[in-house]
Image (cartoon, helix red, strand yellow):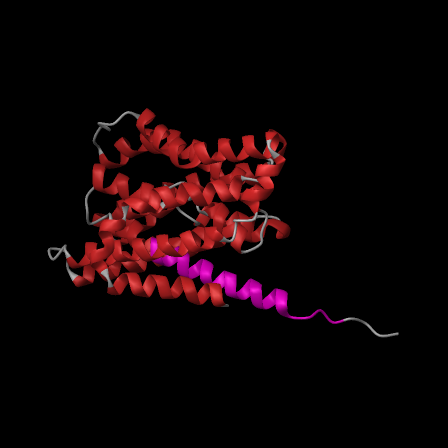
Amino acid sequence: MKKSLYIVGAITLGILLPQLYQLTFLIRYSLIVMLLLTFTGIRITYKNIGRTHIQAALIVVVLTFIHYGWVKLFFPELAMVGFILGAAPTAAAAAVVANMMKLNVSFVTVSTVFSNIVSVIFIPVMLPIFIKEPLTTSPLFIVLQVFITLGIPLIIGQLITLYSPVLSNKITQYKPFSFVLFILNMFIASANCSHYIQNNATISIQTIITIAAITVVIGLINFKVGEWTAPKALKYESGLATGRKNTMFALWICLTYINPMIGLAPVFYIVFHNVYNSAQLWFLERKRNIPKKTGTN
């Protein structure tokens, strides 16, 4: 319960202090540290890849077309909101959230890697088709960004796990510190969201509310489809794989290739998926703290 309150508090404080958006550059570095803490102590091999991982990645691809279609039907000028919130890969922080929720971190980690590989191929190919303009940046640049954020801590974490058990055990002791960095990221991201809205006066309140509402609907669908289609034992893990989006990557795509108005969608999604995961965290903690009934003879 306390963790959930900390997350909600960080989001609220960030909204109230938009001037701290200037700290946005810290998000990537703190995320790399969080991932190193998460990936250390967990062995990941090809044997970890299963049907559910592939299924989760395919769901992301299919939902991209579905979201684009229904948003375009009702709000043609906002159709790219559906595309970007569908196509965005699993956030690197999904493994961190899984760790906090005491879920199968290895499964979520493999899903994150696989999802990013699929998206790195899918987005550069499909984006020009949807926006009717060619990409000016090489897909290799996207691959590099994903590798720096996700690949480096993953590789280092695995090398430490395999070849230095002593160091691995020491690093594992600091895993709880990832929550502190997570809260810091939520605070900065919310400040960024608040600053962006306040400094884009040309966007009407109605448009902002519409984008926010679309974001919530898309977010719920992303999480729920992943949860409903997965085996019961991997319900929440699969939901993270399909619903926890790499919003920083999505925001970069919007600001670079689409337009700032569409960029509001991943900003709102930052708030949405953290509130959603906060509710899940509270529910799971409450569920685990309920004593199981035992039978009597």
Is residue 253 visible in the rendered image? The answer is: yes
Q: Is residue 36 above or below residue 176?
A: above
Residue in the picture at 46% in, 54% down: 179
Task: Measuring from the top left, give residue 261's x and y in whole percent.
Answer: 20, 49
On the image, the x and y values in percent for residue 283 come to: 54, 65
* Residue sitting nearer the eye, 126 or 238: 238
Instruction: Residue at 45% x, 61% y: name it.
Output: 278
- Residue 53 spot, x, y in % from top left: 55, 39
Q: Residue at x 33, y 46 (%)?
A: 27
The kind of secondary structure the magenta stretch mainly shows is: helix
Q: Is 237 situated left or right of 88 in this image?
A: right
- Identified at 37% across, 41% down, the residue is 87
Instruction: Tally the marks.
Output: 0
Q: Is residue 262 left or right of residue 95?
A: left
Q: Nearest the camera: 195 or 164? A: 164
Q: Residue furthest bottom?
A: 296
Visible in this render: residue 65? no
Residue 80 location in percent, x, y?
A: 27, 44
| Quadrant where the image shows the C terminus | bottom right
In the current view of this chain or complex, which residue is farthest to the right? 297
Query: Which residue is outermost to the left?
Result: 202
Magenta extent: 270-293
Q: Along the horizontal axis of the image, is 29 left or right of 23? A: right
Query: Residue 278: within the magenta?
Result: yes
Q: Verify whether residue 181 appears in magenta.
A: no
